[in-house]
Amino acid sequence: MELFISTFLKMFFIMTPFFVLSVFLTVTHESSPKERKKLAIKVTSSVIVISLVLLFFGNHIFEVFGITLDAFRIGAGSLMFLSAVELIQGNKATAKVGDKDVLDLAVVPLAIPITIGPGTIGILLVMGATFESKSSMLMGSLALICAVLVIGIMLYTSSIFEKIIGKQGLLVISKITGLFLAALSAQIVFTGIKNFLGL
């Protein structure tokens, strides 16, 4: 149960849910509530599939490229820290809609790279490689799916969030999420350096 809770919280914050919500509201500002709900379902299912593929095949990716887990920890943590800085500064790239059908935005850019950015990809690969048994992999997968589903529910009910919190409120929450993300990325980098140096 402890593994489930820690994985759930880690993945929830890594995917920067309030930033995702603010981008979602931005790209769907001219859409009807029905279109928003359809897009939310499509984004959620895309993120679940992509996340599970990365989680389950992380080990094989390490083997193919000859990368050590600790080297990847350092790299992924660094990327995630940059994402956190961008989130706090409010410089993280937003989606450009143009003349596209709003449903075409589900996979790119809403699933990748808005929800699953470089930092998230790195952490999913590291997590997949660190699960030592089938039960821990199953528990981790369930926690990951639950975290994505919570974000999916937030997107599905985005119109309510928009009314309650407002755009400024979402901006403030995004910055707070960025602070948590920065601390988490620092911890991942320190763990990688400590193991790499054998301290």
Image (spheres, rainbow, N blue to C red):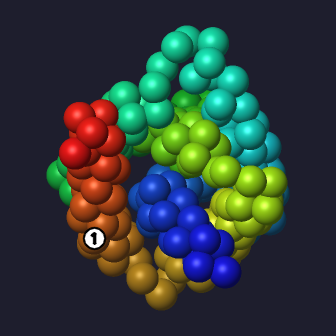
As displayed, is residue 146 above or below residue 191? below
Q: Residue furthest bottom?
A: 164
- The answer to whether residue 21 of the structure is visible from this angle is no
Viewer-proximal residue, 85 or 1?
A: 1
Q: Viewed as shown, does residue 14 lie left or right of 154?
A: left
Residue holding disc 1:
176
Q: Residue furthest front?
A: 198
* Residue name at image x 42 percent, y 82 percent: 165
Total labels: the figure holds: 1
As displayed, is residue 174 above or below residue 53? below
* Residue name at image x 55 percent, y 55 percent: 24
Q: Quadrant of the N terminus?
A: bottom right
- The answer to whether residue 135 of the structure is visible from this angle is yes
Residue 19 in picture, x, y percent from top left: 42, 58
Q: Which quadrant would residue 79 be assigned to in this image?
A: top left
Say what secondary structure mark 1 lies in.
helix
* Residue name at image x 28 percent, y 56 percent: 187
Q: Viewed as shown, does residue 179 lie left or right of 155?
A: left
Residue 89 in picture, x, y percent from top left: 18, 52
As displayed, is residue 141 above or below residue 4? above
Viewer-proximal residue, 194 or 49?
A: 194
* Residue name at image x 64 percent, y 51 percent: 131
Q: Quadrant of the C terminus?
A: top left
Q: Residue furthest top?
A: 65
Q: Please, what is the three-letter code of the amino acid marked with disc 1?
A: Ile
Q: Viewed as shown, does residue 66 lie left or right of 89?
A: right
Q: Which quadrant would residue 129 be assigned to in this image?
A: top right
Label 1 Cα crowd, 10 Å radius (few <14 / some 14-19 / many 20+): some
Residue 4 in picture, x, y percent from top left: 65, 73
